[in-house]
Amino acid sequence: SLSLSLSLSLSLAPPPQFGVDNVLCHVADPTFVGFCSLRGADCGVKTIAKADPHEKVGVLASVGGKPHVVEYSEISTEMAEATREALSGSGTRLLYGAAHICVNWFSLPFLRAFAAGALGEEGSASLPLHVARKKVPCLDPDKGGGSVPLQPSEPNAIKLELFIFDTFPHAAKLVALQVPREHEFAPVKNAPGAASDSPDTACAAFSRLCVDRLVAAGGTVKAPRPCVAANSGNGSRPRPLLEISPLVSYAGEGLEERVAGREFELPQHLC
């Protein structure tokens, strides 16, 4: 990419990499960047605790003594459901419970070495292909001489994918920062009206975070706390939402002078 090329040519610190479908992503999070840099890491990742054993997210794991992200489609049921004693001694936790949310950091020397083919055995480092089975609209070969559109109900195509996190096994040091799901992960993967991971649920999650930040800064909201999706698709009315522009506050800092002692009626956009 142009950003990576500029970083390498000018020896700038590379920007963190993130998935564009995560509404709650903290872009260029200074806490994360500082965490990775201060620990002298080649690579860094953000993780969250899995919501349940079969949540469709990749997990951070050690494979052959090296760090890997194992995709949910590549993990067995037994591994997904395996547990261990919690470090606090209270109950059990998933053994493979550190969900990778596709927020990563790479040091400039590591990126330069990987791009130059200087990593791996005899410089053989490369990214492996992953198989993804997809439902792809096509033409029905049995109707209208192959001219009738078909929306398949089952996967009918194979997509080969490359993942940037497959560089992790070549890192001499990888660090992970576990963050709260409600603060940093609200993906958009499904259509509006879906029960989870939709534009509606992402908007509601972002609004909840904004309400928390407003209240922490001394403000109050007049409408009920928005705690469900904006529109469930079942005819219910949208809940009023709050949005605090990142131009006003990146992560809740500096809000006191704007909101302390004030009541805000939702919907509201602080900009």
Image (cartoon, helix red, strand yellow):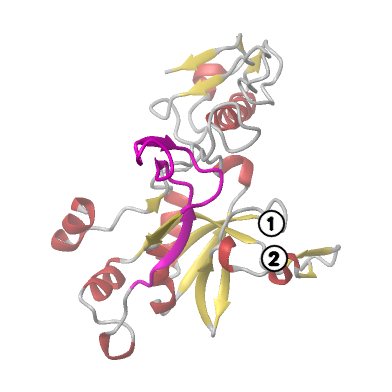
Q: Mark 1 highlights which residue?
A: 54
- Residue 264 among magenta residues: no
Direction from residue 79 to residue 169 in the image, left or right: left
Q: Position of residue 132 (x, y in %)?
A: 47, 59
Q: Mark 2 highlights which residue?
A: 80
Residue span colored magenta: 127-156
Nearer-N-terminus badge (1/2): 1
Please name whichever residue, 263 or 230, is drawn nearer the observer in this view of the structure.
230
Report the residue at 47% width, 71% height from top: 174
Q: Position of residue 166 (x, y in %)?
A: 41, 69
Q: In the rendered view, would you say 203 is above or below 166? A: above
At label 2, counting other C-alpha atoms closer than 10 Å, the crowd grade (few under 14, some 14-19, many 20 or more) is some
Q: Quadrant of the C terminus?
A: top left
Q: In the rendered view, would you say 140 is above or below 229? A: below
Classified by dominant secondary structure, the portion drawn in magenta counts as loop
Direction from residue 194 to residue 28 in the image, left or right: left
Residue that sits furthest to the bottom in the current view: 122
Report the residue at 13% width, 62% height from top: 9
Element under label 1? Answer: loop
